[in-house]
Image (tube, rainbow, N blue to C red):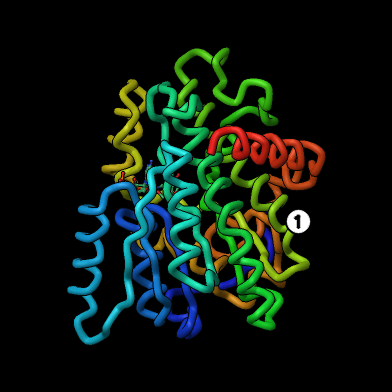
Amino acid sequence: MHSRDAKFSEKDIPDLSGYVVIVTGGNSGIGYETAQQLAIKNARVYIAGRSQERVQEAIRQMSQSNVTKQLDLRFLQLDLQDLKSVRAAALRFMTEESRLDILINNAGVMTVPYKLTVDGFETQWQVNYLAPHVLTSTLMPLLLKTASSSGSSDRVRVVNVSSDAAFFGPKTLLLDDVNMTETKGVMELWQRYGHSKQASIRDAKELNDRYGSQGVTAYSLHPGIVRSNLQRHDPTVIGSVVRTLMKFAAGSTPLEGALNSLFCATSPKAPIMGQGQYFVPVGKLDSRAANWINDSKTNKKLWQQSEDLIKRLV
Ligand SMILES: NC(=O)c1ccc[n+]([C@@H]2O[C@H](COP(=O)([O-])OP(=O)(O)OC[C@H]3O[C@@H](n4cnc5c(N)ncnc54)[C@H](OP(=O)(O)O)[C@@H]3O)[C@@H](O)[C@H]2O)c1
């Protein structure tokens, strides 16, 4: 199932002086460690989040843990539950920065109760797939410009943090009912989570198909089973079981959970191994997503549907 081992630790991140990076959800869990490690390697890192207080507190903690080094960490305000705020954040960013080398779509929610956002989408669909798509798509001119001026075919990367839970969801996308209104039962929150994470895998592939030849490559990944705040949302019995299991199960640390993102974002091996592909920890290709990755007809439809929405909504 998994192919080609690639051992990778935070020590293998190359020097990132001159890089500008955005990590969504960098104030907590996997995103916190992802942002911190990139900043330690001299990147300017924007932590995109909905709470200025939580992001500033994370920046304060990272700075305190690295007192011998001046980390270049900044806050970018955005709420993935509000597409207008996502688009505004991207447009603001493009007036403030003249390059963007790496975008890590890390923020996410898992098994939250069914609720529509202000834009009319089920929360998990919007936070885990649609809003990251809007962010990436709006930032694309800057990503392309950075790629063209860098003279490198694989420096500029988009990384979608997906999940193996994608395989618990529907076999394919329900593009006529992305909110999955008909899905009921004990597993419905997981089904919707899996659905949103499938879209995130497909989106990375379609992005790579469209822009890889212009120097913007994309990747999707599973970070592992990681102890973080992610498990807090599910109000059902299954949620309690998962939280109890996580207390006793080994689980990875957030730093271990960040390694696959760091590999896809910075390792010279990632573009050689699998542009547009789905990676499991750490730096291994996983063929379980092949049916989705190779289904370019649905991937294009998903892309077009999302682009049409952007025009209509934001
Ligand atoms: N932990 C695991 O075992 C695991 C397994 C597979 C995949 N993943 C994926 O890994 C990613 C990171 O998860 P994690 O485990 O690090 O969870 P986490 O500790 O809960 O962090 C999630 C981050 O997403 C942010 N976020 C949530 N809703 C947002 C919104 N509307 N706008 C902006 N930011 C928002 C959170 O910000 P707030 O602090 O403001 O809520 C937080 O910074 C997620 O995409 C998750 O699906 C995790």
The residue lying toward the viewer, choosing from 28 and 48, is: 48
Residue ID at (32%, 42%):
246
- The quadrant where residue 289 appears: top right
- The quadrant where residue 93 appears: bottom left
- On screen, residue 234 versus residue 168, left or right, reads left
Identity, as a three-letter code, of the amino acid under mark 1: Arg
Residue ID at (47%, 65%):
95
Residue ID at (30%, 56%):
27
- On screen, residue 179 versus residue 237, left or right, reads right
Residue 269, percent across and down?
64, 75
Q: Secondary structure at mark 1?
A: helix
Q: Please name the residue that numbered disc 1 is placed on.
A: 210
Q: Residues within 10 Å of mark 1 (few under 14, many from 20)?
A: some
Q: Is residue 115 visible?
A: yes
Q: Is residue 297 above or below residue 29?
A: above
Residue ID at (43%, 28%):
117
Residue 211, percent across and down?
73, 61
Q: Is residue 109 above or below residue 138?
A: above
- The quadrant where residue 176 appears: top right
Q: Is residue 290 above or below residue 219?
A: above
Q: Is residue 100 above or below residue 133?
A: below
- On screen, residue 237 versus residue 189, left or right, reads left
- On screen, residue 212 versus residue 99, left or right, reads right
Q: Is residue 251 visible?
A: no
The residue lying toward the viewer, choosing from 31 and 103, is: 103
